[in-house]
Image (cartoon, rainbow, N blue to C red):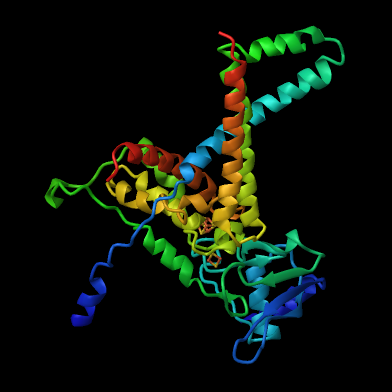
Amino acid sequence: MNAQQTTTNQLPEKKYIRSHEPIFWGLFGAGGMLTAFLTPVMVLVTGLLIPLGLIDAEHLSYEKLHQFVSSWYGAPIVLVLVALPLWHTLHRIFHSLHDLGIKRGRDWQQVICYGFAFAVSVFVFTLLLQMLSL
Amino acid sequence: MSAQTMPTQQAVSDKVIEVEILRYRPEQDEKPFPQLFEVPYSPDMSILEALQYIKDHLDSTVSFRWSCRMAICGSCGLMVNNVPKLGCKAFLRDYYPQKIKLEALANFPIERDLVVDMGDFIKKLEEIKPYIIPATDDKCLSEGTYKQTPEQMEKYKQYSMCINCGLCYAACPQYGLDSKFTGPAALALLARYNRDSRDAGSAERMKIVNQEEGVWSCTFVGYCSVVCPKGVDPAAAIQLLKVESSKDYLIGMFKPD
Ligand code: SF4
Ligand code: FES
């Protein structure tokens, strides 16, 4: 009877620590989606359609692109196009390091990987801000 | 019985298939070593039956687990040519005339020969609260049963088909790298209860999901779903839980508990 009572006692509630992974997973997912949809289109346009002359190269001239990038709608699009795939890539690299069994300095790996993605995102953001002509 | 049936069986076919078993008897072997057996081949013979033939006729010291012989009990999991399989659901015809290499399930400690220590897996299954947690202001027993529509049942049915064979843990590279990971079958079972309309324990279980060793150790390799003999698709269950965990994270940012 006694033994039974002790075995049916509730286990002490475990301490659960929430992971911050959702932020990085979200950026990873969004970046992956963009890359998956846009890379084939970009390859098609720049690698096939333009060289074959099916699209006039004038449409992607420096002046046209500069104008687009410095417009209020072009700047955020370019920021998203650069930053999200970057977060995607560095998240993948961070997890691949774990898959390769590199256990040492996981927190430093994290700081370097996501730090790099963050730094480049900020850099692109400021660059675009300077180019902006309203 | 087998002694009587054997001669006729051998008359039907004199083909043999080579079966190599990774042996390990902790009290006498320093480390696991392979041992080769020759088994009479027949196309409808399962790997489990081949093992039983070996135990009955060639070497009675070979140890392996089995019970139902029909992919129900989940006890006969092993590595067949390095792929996690149920011994009773894999057949010699799919390997013949090549040699078959049998080893204990990967990612688990070997107890003896093809028998592994499943302790950690069982602990993971227990930890995710695998039972219906009713709402506290729930109805009295006398008010009758909980009814469920076919749609409500469809939401979790697939995740309830697991037979706890552990093949998905043997397949999971993340569990292999770090066994703190809750792992595919336990998370699929967690999803099974969280998706059940009669259950009100989601908030409790989300704490398990939200941890690093919850869903976030998974990198969506997907091999667990490939090897699962019951079509449970634990990888999909984990992906769905990642979405839930992300929602939970956002909500947690605005109203921390
Ligand atoms: S999810 Fe599939 S592979 Fe994993 S333990 Fe359950 S039945 Fe076996
Ligand atoms: S013996 Fe039961 S699942 Fe194979």
Q: On the rendered structure, is B157 left or right of A2?
A: right
* Residue at the extreme right: A52
**Residue at 50% in and 59% down:** B181
Work out whether residue B172 can be spotted. no
Image location (x, y in percent) of residue B226:
62, 51
Give B10 or B251, whichever is nearer the viewer: B251
- Asked whether, in this view, residue B248 is left or right of residue A104, the answer is left
- Image quadrant assignment for residue A27: top right
> Where residue A24 sits in the image (x, y, percent)?
52, 41
Q: Where's residue B210, x and y in %?
A: 41, 49
At x 49%, y 47%, the residue is: B238
The residue sitting at 72% across, 21% down in the picture is A41
Q: Vertically, is A70 above or below A3?
A: above
Report the label total. 0
Relative horizontal placement of residue A54, taking residue B5 as reference (left or right) = right
Vertical side of B79 occupied by B10: above or below: below
Residue B96: x, y in percent?
79, 64
**Residue located at (41% from left, 44% from top):** B156
Where is B230 relative to B108, above or below? above
Answer left or right for B206 relative to B118: left
- The residue nearer to you, when weighing B242 against A94, is A94
Where does the N terminus of chain B fall, quadrant-wise?
A: bottom right
Q: Quadrant of residue A79?
A: top right
Q: Nearer the viewer, residue B179 or A31?
A: A31
In the rendered image, the residue lying farthest to the front is A130
Residue A121 seen in the current view? yes
In the foreground, A21 or A132: A132
Q: Quadrant of residue B249?
A: top left
Judged from the image, the quadrant occupied by ligand 2 is bottom right
